[in-house]
Amino acid sequence: MSKTSFAHTQQIAQMARSLLSPVLLAFFLAAASVVSNAGVAEAWHWHGWRHIFRGRYGHHDHISSIVSEDDYASLFLHKDDAACPAKGFYNYSAFVSAAERFPEFGSTGRNFDTRRREVAAFLAQISHETTGGWATAPDGPFAWGLCFKEELTPPSNYCDANNTQWPCVPGKSYHGRGPMQLSWNYNYGPAGEALDFDGLGNPEVVASDPVVAFKAALWFWMTPQPPKPSCHDVMVGRYRPTRADKAANRRTGFGLTTNIINGGLECNRTGNAQADDRVGYYRHYGDILGVRNLGPNLDCANQLPFS
């Protein structure tokens, strides 16, 4: 047994003694011994055990029980590269702090795999929105999430002048900012109201304060905007399709979150590179986080958009 194998065994044993009954303790100690002697598969097995213990017996209502700081670094290998304009912005502590504002995020669902699946889906979507990757990028195209914090050359100021509930402030631009690339005055206004910042008068804060940036992304993820359900409800099994949803083939799964976010441009068409990139990130992150089942309907190629 290598020193690393022995250390892993001791870590498993220590967790087991503090968490399990005598019968289960004996079972897990035996399993730990098997894992430690598994040779090439050792690292994968330890990663799986770690997620099982953290998720089932840890404080799974906290996001760090699903995504540790080491996991975060593995997910976003190049976010702090000099080539990324968001270098140093999207730090792990900001993500964890923002997630505490939304206690149902990553803590809702019938089992731990459901919770991991939601978090993987959220991180995949924000990674696509901020990607700096390309097909032949170092470490692959899905190692470059969170590379940007705002649109560099927005085509407009994203002001819907017809929306009088959330009127634009003269001189302000509501272009994409933050992990979800929050856009338009009708999103900045209610996000700011919900999160206690001036979304219409100071939209720039979404690209200057990393905690606010993550909170704004999670607000979008967690908040239904009828007729659209929330991405959160879709991923944790709360979504119940209306008659119109059924007619439009809008079915539960990761693909429906893509429809919610950008369905008008990416859904009801096959071979869409943007939608495919989202699925690629989701598969990649699901593997890193140990998601056993990614769920059905990963794309929205056969779904009509909401509008």
Image (cartoon, rainbow, N blue to C red):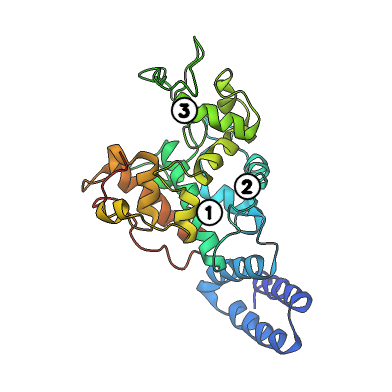
Callout 2 crowding tier (Cα within 10 Å): few <14, some 14–19, many ≥20 = some
Residue 218 picture quarter = top right
Q: State which tag comes first along the sequence, 2 or 3.
A: 2
* Residue at far left of view: 270
- Mark 3 → mark 1, Cα distance in angstroms: 26 Å
Q: Is residue 289 above or below residue 111?
A: above
Residue 86 location, x and y as percent? 53, 30
Numbered tag placed on residue 119 in the rendering: 1
* Residue at far top of view: 171
Could you tell me which residue is drawn at 45 percent across and 41 percent down? Answer: 225
Callout 3 crowding tier (Cα within 10 Å): few <14, some 14–19, many ≥20 = many
Q: Amino acid at mark 3?
A: Tyr
Could you tell me which residue is drawn at 62 percent across and 77 percent down? Answer: 36
Could you tell me which residue is drawn at 42 percent across and 35 percent down? Answer: 132
Residue 31 picture quarter = bottom right
* Residue matched to label 2: 102
Q: Amino acid at mark 2?
A: Phe
Please say whether residue 28 is visible from this viewpoint: yes
Q: Is residue 288 above or below residue 218?
A: below
* Residue at far right of view: 18
Q: Is residue 72 above or below residue 94?
A: below
> Of helix, strand and loop, which one carries label 3?
helix
- Which image quarter is the C terminus in? top left
> Of helix, strand and loop, which one carries label 1?
helix
Given residues 76 and 191, the one toward you in this image is 191
* Residue matched to label 3: 186
Q: Is residue 83 left or right of residue 66?
A: left
Q: Amino acid at mark 1?
A: Val
- Which image quarter is the N terminus in? bottom right
